[in-house]
Image: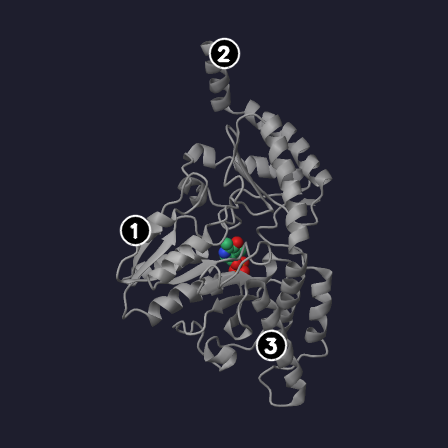
């Protein structure tokens, strides 16, 4: 099997699993306990908080553990909106946000908030000048993702943060695809809230975090016990949190090397596809791009059929995002970068990890060289296209 769906989830690192194991078996105390057995669980939580804070230049007491990226995004949007409603009810997001942000914004819109959805350019980047023009006196939050999960485009966070700061508007970024993969600095980028998720950087599933800058007003999203300084109730997922901390430390220590190795495989995939497969279009930014992301549209190819044939060849890939596959709607991200419906349907996302080799990349392109002509040969649109081209000659 060749796994090229690391944007959907990653394999748990063995070192992370070993770090988690004692907290599932011997060290199972609820950290809220008053006995010394619990103090060890609590110390493990605080250690993980430090490991995670270090990745983004935050302080440990600004890290709040959640159940994942989706909860962190929901909390950031709804928590800030509810806590700041007196100041205003206007929020700015981009058109290519993850559904966890988009649908949280939809929910707020149903409750009377005004949402501005900023368009992106053909590469998927937000224009900082357009963002600044959208800010109003009643704007309380800007939520722009750090890097897009489908097309890999990295957003100009520093410019966005600078504008938000200058206008006194809070800045949240969904950094689920970026955290542990590319450098992030909440000070340099003026980020007030940041979402991350353990399973996107070789940590466990079902655990995430929200960075909340000291002083930011945010209503709790989960009501209950006094965990996480009374801001996020619920018994702490100690093994998950320990695992996310260990994965964060490993990711930070290896970042430079992993960026180099992933980018080399990514660029090899892109170069071969562009050279060898006609009517292929690279989606996303060519340079400001996640090291692990490749996304192409193949004209006259139906995405779902392509994925089925790749699957039959033992290759795991996706079209658009895991959340949209299974529905027949083309991805909102591909539509936002201006692709027409029929082309957006033929998209393929190959998301790689440091475990992906050049041989894996070659094997995938070799398969595509068989699959794509085969699918095109069954497409009446492609037949018409070829006939028109012949007529024109
Ligand atoms: C995966 C993902 C999420 C959701 O995170 P979960 O931990 O799976 O809930 C949110 N945003 C982006 C950009 C993602 O890639």
Place residue 25 in its image quadrant. bottom right
Instruction: Using the image, tell me which numbered label, if any, was put on residue 133.
Output: 1
Q: Secondary structure at mark 3?
A: helix
Query: In the picture shown, does residue 388 fall above or below 245?
Result: above
Disc 3 to disc 1, how far (Cα)?
41 Å
Q: Dot 2 surroundings within 10 Å: few (below 14), some, or many (20 or more)?
A: few
Do tag 1 and tag 2 residues touch (Cβ < 8 Å)? no
Q: Nearer the viewer, mark 3 or mark 2?
A: 3
Residue 349: image x %, image y %?
Answer: 56, 42
* Front position in the image: 117 or 325: 117
Q: Mark 3 or mark 1, which has the lower sequence index?
A: 3
Q: Secondary structure at mark 1?
A: helix
Residue at x 56%, y 35% (from the top left corner): 305
Q: Mark 3 or mark 2, which has the lower sequence index?
A: 3
Place residue 101 in its image quadrant. bottom left
Which residue is labeled 2 in the image? Answer: 390
């Amino acid at each position: 099997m060749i796994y090229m769906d690391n944007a959907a989830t990653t394999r748990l690192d063995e070192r992370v699993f070993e770090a988690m194991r004692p907290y599932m078996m011997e060290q199972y105390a609820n950290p809220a306990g008053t006995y010394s057995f619990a103090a060890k669980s609590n110390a493990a939580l605080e250690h993980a908080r430090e490991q995670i804070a270090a990745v983004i230049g935050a302080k440990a007491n600004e890290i709040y553990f959640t159940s994942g990226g989706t909860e962190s995004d929901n909390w950031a949007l709804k928590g800030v909106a509810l806590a700041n409603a007196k100041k205003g009810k206007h929020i700015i997001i981009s058109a290519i946000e993850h559904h966890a942000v988009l649908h949280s914004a939809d929910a707020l819109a149903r409750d009377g908030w005004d949402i501005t959805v900023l368009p992106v350019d053909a590469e998927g980047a937000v224009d900082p000048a357009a963002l600044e023009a959208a800010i109003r006196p009643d704007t309380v939050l800007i939520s722009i993702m750090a890097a897009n999960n489908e097309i890999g485009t990295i957003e100009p966070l520093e410019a966005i943060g600078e504008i938000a700061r200058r206008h006194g508007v809070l800045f949240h970024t969904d950094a689920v695809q970026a955290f542990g993969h590319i450098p992030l600095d909440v000070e340099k980028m003026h980020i007030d809230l940041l979402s991350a998720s353990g399973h996107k950087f070789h940590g466990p599933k079902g655990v995430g975090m929200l960075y909340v800058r000291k002083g930011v007003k945010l209503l709790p999203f989960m009501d209950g016990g006094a965990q996480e300084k009374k801001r996020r109730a619920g018994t702490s997922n100690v093994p998950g949190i320990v695992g996310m901390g260990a994965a964060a430390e490993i990711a930070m220590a290896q970042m430079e090397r992993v960026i180099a190795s992933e980018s080399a495989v990514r660029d090899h995939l892109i170069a071969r596809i562009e050279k060898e497969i006609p009517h292929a279009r690279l989606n996303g930014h060519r340079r400001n791009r996640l090291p692990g992301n490749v996304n192409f549209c193949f004209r006259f190819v139906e995405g779902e059929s392509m994925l089925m044939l790749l699957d039959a060849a033992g290759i795991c890939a996706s079209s658009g995002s895991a959340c949209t596959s299974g529905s027949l709607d083309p991805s909102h991200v591909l539509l936002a970068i201006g692709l027409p419906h029929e082309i957006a349907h033929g998209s393929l996302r190959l998301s790689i990890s440091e475990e992906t080799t050049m041989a894996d990349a070659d094997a995938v392109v070799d398969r595509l060289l068989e699959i794509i002509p085969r699918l095109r040969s069954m497409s009446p649109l492609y037949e018409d296209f070829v006939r028109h081209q012949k007529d024109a000659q």
